[in-house]
Amino acid sequence: MNLVPGRLENGTFSAPGISIPDVRLAHSGDVTLGVRPEDCHVTDSGGHMSAPVYGVEPTGDLTYLTLKPGNLLFEVKADRSYRSDLGRTKLSLLIYRGCISLTQSAASGSGEVCHAGRLHIHGLLHV
């Protein structure tokens, strides 16, 4: 699971190198994004993330890519034949919004969890 600290404002999650619009939550503040490597897709342009390639690990049936948005490492699954130059290639990545989790930061609230567009804050469900 990739865990990315960031901020949710006006329905957009933002962190260095990452912007996910239309999250559709009535919450603003510091949150942590959780997304699995299989819930992302490498694309030519227009993705939610743009980051340099930090690692490429072919495993036979797929290739694990490690991207480096800001100071974080972010794991993604790609096609088995995918190859990239380390550090030189900046990839665009789509993140499937229906598969993300958001956790409210302890400093800004309850620390409860959002799955697939639902965030529980102080016992209330915001959609």
Image (cartoon, rainbow, N blue to C red):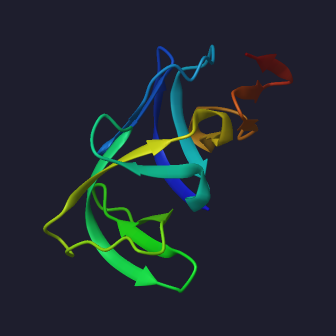
On screen, residue 70 above or below 27: below
Nearest the viewer among 124 and 78 is 78
Instruction: Residue 97 in the image: state x and y as whole percent.
Output: 59, 34
Nearest the viewer among 16 and 97 is 97
Residue sitting farthest toward the front: 81
On screen, residue 116 above or below 74: above
Which quadrant of the view contains residue 88?
bottom left
Which quadrant of the view contains residue 73?
bottom left
Instruction: Residue 35 in the image: state x and y as whole percent.
Output: 59, 51
Nearest the viewer among 93 and 71 is 93
On screen, residue 100 above or below 28: below
Identified at 21% across, 75% down, the residue is 86
Q: Is residue 78 left or right of residue 54?
A: right
Nearest the viewer among 55 and 46 is 46
Q: Is residue 113 left or right of residue 17?
A: right
Residue sitting farthest toward the left: 88
Q: Is residue 1 left or right of residue 127?
A: left
Identified at 39% across, 70% down, the residue is 66
Q: How many marks?
A: 0
Quadrant of image for the C terminus: top right
Quadrant of image for the N terminus: bottom right
Instruction: Residue 79 in the image: state x and y as whole percent.
Output: 48, 67
